[in-house]
Image (cartoon, rainbow, N blue to C red):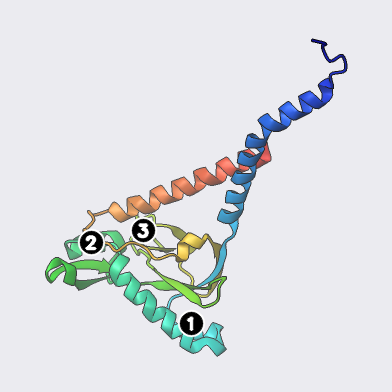
Protein backbone atom coordinates (compact mmCIF):
# COMPACT_ATOMS: atom_id res chain seq x y z
CA UNK A 1 0.00 0.00 0.00
CA UNK A 2 1.35 3.38 -0.95
CA UNK A 3 1.45 6.11 1.61
CA UNK A 4 0.07 9.49 0.69
CA UNK A 5 3.02 11.78 0.33
CA UNK A 6 1.15 15.07 0.34
CA UNK A 7 -0.60 15.41 3.68
CA UNK A 8 -2.17 18.78 4.29
CA UNK A 9 -1.13 19.19 7.93
CA UNK A 10 -2.39 22.75 8.09
CA UNK A 11 -5.87 21.68 7.07
CA UNK A 12 -5.70 18.78 9.54
CA UNK A 13 -4.77 21.09 12.41
CA UNK A 14 -7.47 23.55 11.40
CA UNK A 15 -10.06 20.77 11.32
CA UNK A 16 -8.93 19.48 14.74
CA UNK A 17 -9.15 22.95 16.26
CA UNK A 18 -12.60 23.49 14.81
CA UNK A 19 -13.89 20.19 16.15
CA UNK A 20 -12.43 20.69 19.61
CA UNK A 21 -13.04 24.38 20.07
CA UNK A 22 -16.58 24.50 18.76
CA UNK A 23 -18.14 23.22 22.04
CA UNK A 24 -16.10 25.80 23.97
CA UNK A 25 -17.16 28.54 21.60
CA UNK A 26 -20.76 27.44 21.93
CA UNK A 27 -20.47 27.45 25.73
CA UNK A 28 -18.98 30.95 25.71
CA UNK A 29 -21.70 32.13 23.35
CA UNK A 30 -24.32 30.65 25.64
CA UNK A 31 -22.85 32.50 28.63
CA UNK A 32 -22.98 35.81 26.79
CA UNK A 33 -26.49 35.10 25.56
CA UNK A 34 -27.63 34.33 29.11
CA UNK A 35 -25.88 37.45 30.36
CA UNK A 36 -27.63 39.43 27.66
CA UNK A 37 -31.00 38.02 28.69
CA UNK A 38 -30.31 38.80 32.35
CA UNK A 39 -29.23 42.32 31.45
CA UNK A 40 -32.35 42.87 29.33
CA UNK A 41 -34.00 44.80 32.13
CA UNK A 42 -37.44 46.34 32.38
CA UNK A 43 -37.92 50.02 33.13
CA UNK A 44 -40.29 50.54 36.03
CA UNK A 45 -41.59 53.51 37.96
CA UNK A 46 -42.10 53.41 41.72
CA UNK A 47 -44.90 55.28 43.46
CA UNK A 48 -46.18 55.50 47.00
CA UNK A 49 -49.82 55.83 45.97
CA UNK A 50 -52.28 56.25 43.08
CA UNK A 51 -52.20 60.07 43.22
CA UNK A 52 -48.44 60.20 42.70
CA UNK A 53 -48.74 57.84 39.75
CA UNK A 54 -51.64 59.76 38.20
CA UNK A 55 -49.82 63.10 38.49
CA UNK A 56 -46.78 61.64 36.76
CA UNK A 57 -48.94 59.94 34.10
CA UNK A 58 -52.01 62.15 33.45
CA UNK A 59 -53.31 59.91 30.68
CA UNK A 60 -52.99 56.68 32.65
CA UNK A 61 -54.92 57.36 35.84
CA UNK A 62 -57.03 54.22 35.45
CA UNK A 63 -53.96 52.09 34.88
CA UNK A 64 -52.34 53.63 37.97
CA UNK A 65 -55.37 52.66 40.02
CA UNK A 66 -55.57 49.16 38.56
CA UNK A 67 -51.87 48.51 39.16
CA UNK A 68 -52.14 49.80 42.72
CA UNK A 69 -55.10 47.52 43.50
CA UNK A 70 -53.35 44.54 41.92
CA UNK A 71 -50.25 45.29 43.99
CA UNK A 72 -52.39 45.39 47.16
CA UNK A 73 -53.76 41.94 46.39
CA UNK A 74 -50.24 40.70 45.72
CA UNK A 75 -49.05 42.19 49.02
CA UNK A 76 -51.71 40.25 50.93
CA UNK A 77 -50.30 37.03 49.51
CA UNK A 78 -46.57 37.66 49.46
CA UNK A 79 -45.71 40.12 52.26
CA UNK A 80 -43.71 38.72 55.20
CA UNK A 81 -46.04 37.47 57.93
CA UNK A 82 -45.48 37.70 61.69
CA UNK A 83 -47.17 35.89 64.58
CA UNK A 84 -47.35 39.04 66.71
CA UNK A 85 -47.63 42.79 66.27
CA UNK A 86 -44.47 43.27 68.31
CA UNK A 87 -42.38 41.20 65.89
CA UNK A 88 -43.69 43.11 62.87
CA UNK A 89 -43.19 46.52 64.51
CA UNK A 90 -39.65 45.57 65.55
CA UNK A 91 -38.90 44.88 61.90
CA UNK A 92 -40.76 47.70 60.14
CA UNK A 93 -41.39 50.37 62.77
CA UNK A 94 -44.42 51.83 64.52
CA UNK A 95 -47.43 52.49 62.31
CA UNK A 96 -46.10 50.23 59.55
CA UNK A 97 -47.99 47.03 60.36
CA UNK A 98 -51.53 45.74 60.02
CA UNK A 99 -53.40 42.68 61.17
CA UNK A 100 -54.88 40.35 58.57
CA UNK A 101 -56.62 37.02 58.41
CA UNK A 102 -55.23 34.09 56.50
CA UNK A 103 -58.11 32.11 55.05
CA UNK A 104 -55.88 29.16 54.18
CA UNK A 105 -54.85 28.85 57.83
CA UNK A 106 -58.38 28.20 59.05
CA UNK A 107 -59.02 31.86 59.74
CA UNK A 108 -55.88 32.38 61.79
CA UNK A 109 -54.61 35.94 62.03
CA UNK A 110 -51.13 37.36 61.54
CA UNK A 111 -49.37 40.68 61.21
CA UNK A 112 -47.81 42.04 58.05
CA UNK A 113 -46.22 45.32 56.91
CA UNK A 114 -48.34 47.90 55.14
CA UNK A 115 -47.64 48.29 51.44
CA UNK A 116 -45.44 51.38 51.23
CA UNK A 117 -45.64 51.71 47.46
CA UNK A 118 -45.61 49.77 44.24
CA UNK A 119 -43.58 49.43 41.08
CA UNK A 120 -45.27 49.53 37.71
CA UNK A 121 -43.79 48.68 34.34
CA UNK A 122 -44.93 48.04 30.80
CA UNK A 123 -44.06 44.57 29.58
CA UNK A 124 -42.42 43.80 26.23
CA UNK A 125 -45.55 42.06 24.98
CA UNK A 126 -47.80 44.95 25.97
CA UNK A 127 -49.80 45.50 29.14
CA UNK A 128 -48.52 46.34 32.60
CA UNK A 129 -47.10 44.39 35.50
CA UNK A 130 -46.72 45.52 39.09
CA UNK A 131 -45.29 44.44 42.42
CA UNK A 132 -45.89 45.75 45.97
CA UNK A 133 -43.05 47.49 47.77
CA UNK A 134 -42.40 47.76 51.50
CA UNK A 135 -40.20 49.93 53.67
CA UNK A 136 -39.03 50.07 57.28
CA UNK A 137 -38.90 52.97 59.72
CA UNK A 138 -36.60 51.13 62.07
CA UNK A 139 -33.13 52.76 61.74
CA UNK A 140 -31.49 49.41 62.55
CA UNK A 141 -33.18 47.63 59.65
CA UNK A 142 -31.43 47.20 56.26
CA UNK A 143 -34.81 48.14 54.73
CA UNK A 144 -34.94 51.48 56.56
CA UNK A 145 -35.97 54.20 54.09
CA UNK A 146 -35.67 51.78 51.16
CA UNK A 147 -38.16 50.27 48.77
CA UNK A 148 -37.91 46.47 49.05
CA UNK A 149 -40.09 43.77 47.55
CA UNK A 150 -41.46 40.62 49.17
CA UNK A 151 -38.32 38.65 48.30
CA UNK A 152 -36.10 41.18 50.11
CA UNK A 153 -34.65 42.78 46.97
CA UNK A 154 -33.65 46.40 47.60
CA UNK A 155 -34.61 49.05 45.01
CA UNK A 156 -33.06 52.07 46.70
CA UNK A 157 -34.61 55.11 48.32
CA UNK A 158 -38.35 54.95 49.06
CA UNK A 159 -38.93 58.08 47.00
CA UNK A 160 -42.12 58.24 44.98
CA UNK A 161 -41.83 58.84 41.24
CA UNK A 162 -38.41 57.28 40.72
CA UNK A 163 -37.73 55.23 37.62
CA UNK A 164 -35.24 52.38 37.48
CA UNK A 165 -34.10 49.46 35.36
CA UNK A 166 -34.81 46.16 37.08
CA UNK A 167 -34.40 42.50 36.09
CA UNK A 168 -37.46 40.95 34.47
CA UNK A 169 -37.72 38.67 37.49
CA UNK A 170 -38.56 41.71 39.64
CA UNK A 171 -41.99 41.95 38.01
CA UNK A 172 -42.64 38.20 38.07
CA UNK A 173 -45.25 36.91 40.56
CA UNK A 174 -43.76 35.93 43.93
CA UNK A 175 -44.72 32.77 45.83
CA UNK A 176 -47.36 33.20 48.51
CA UNK A 177 -46.05 33.46 52.06
CA UNK A 178 -47.71 30.78 54.17
CA UNK A 179 -45.43 30.67 57.22
CA UNK A 180 -44.62 33.35 59.74
CA UNK A 181 -41.08 34.66 60.00
CA UNK A 182 -39.18 35.39 63.17
CA UNK A 183 -38.33 38.88 64.36
CA UNK A 184 -35.55 40.32 62.22
CA UNK A 185 -35.80 37.48 59.69
CA UNK A 186 -36.91 39.66 56.80
CA UNK A 187 -34.16 42.19 57.55
CA UNK A 188 -31.61 39.40 57.32
CA UNK A 189 -33.03 38.45 53.93
CA UNK A 190 -32.68 42.05 52.71
CA UNK A 191 -29.07 42.15 53.94
CA UNK A 192 -28.24 38.82 52.23
CA UNK A 193 -29.81 40.00 48.97
CA UNK A 194 -27.68 43.15 49.09
CA UNK A 195 -24.52 41.13 49.76
CA UNK A 196 -25.28 38.77 46.88
CA UNK A 197 -25.93 41.72 44.57
CA UNK A 198 -22.62 43.37 45.48
CA UNK A 199 -20.78 40.08 45.04
CA UNK A 200 -22.39 39.52 41.62
CA UNK A 201 -21.50 43.06 40.52
CA UNK A 202 -17.89 42.63 41.66
CA UNK A 203 -17.59 39.31 39.82
CA UNK A 204 -18.95 40.85 36.63
CA UNK A 205 -16.51 43.75 36.89
CA UNK A 206 -13.57 41.38 37.28
CA UNK A 207 -14.76 39.20 34.40
CA UNK A 208 -15.16 42.02 31.93
CA UNK A 209 -12.59 44.41 33.31
CA UNK A 210 -9.68 41.93 33.40
Q: Provide the residue designation for mark 1.
A: 52
Q: Specify few, some or many for label 3: CA neighbours under 10 Å numbering under 14, 14-19, or 20 or more.
A: few
Judged from this view, the residue extending furthest toward the right is 6
Whether residue 41 is situated above or below residue 115 in the rendered picture: above
Which is more toward the observer, 209 or 183? 209
- Quarter of the figure with the N terminus: top right
Q: Secondary structure at mark 1?
A: helix
Quadrant in which residue 114 is drawn: bottom left
Residue 139 bears which disc, if any?
3
Q: Provide the residue designation for mark 2.
A: 178
Residue at image position (67%, 36%) is 22
Quadrant in which residue 71 is drawn: bottom left
User: Viewer-nearest of labels 3 and 1?
Assistant: 1
Q: How many marks?
A: 3
Quadrant in which residue 77 is drawn: bottom left
Which is more toward the observer, 93 or 173? 173
Is 154 left or right of 125, judged from the image as shown?
Answer: left
| Separation (CA) of disc 3 from disc 2 | 27 Å
Q: Is residue 156 visible?
A: yes
Residue at image position (53%, 70%) is 44
Percent x, y for residue 157?
A: 48, 64
Judged from this view, the residue extending furthest toward the front is 1
User: Viewer-nearest of labels 3 and 2?
Assistant: 2
User: Reading the chain from its start, which is encountered first: label 3 or label 1?
Assistant: 1
Is 167 left or right of 26, judged from the image as shown?
Answer: left
| Separation (CA) of disc 1 from disc 2 | 32 Å
Q: Secondary structure at mark 3?
A: loop
Percent x, y for residue 23?
A: 63, 36
Amino acid sequence: MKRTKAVNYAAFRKSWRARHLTPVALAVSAVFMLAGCEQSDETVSMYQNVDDCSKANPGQSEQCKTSYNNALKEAEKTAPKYASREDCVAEFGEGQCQQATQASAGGGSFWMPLMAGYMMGRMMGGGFAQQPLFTSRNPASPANGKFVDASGRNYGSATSGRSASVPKSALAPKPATTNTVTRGGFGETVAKQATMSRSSSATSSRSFGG
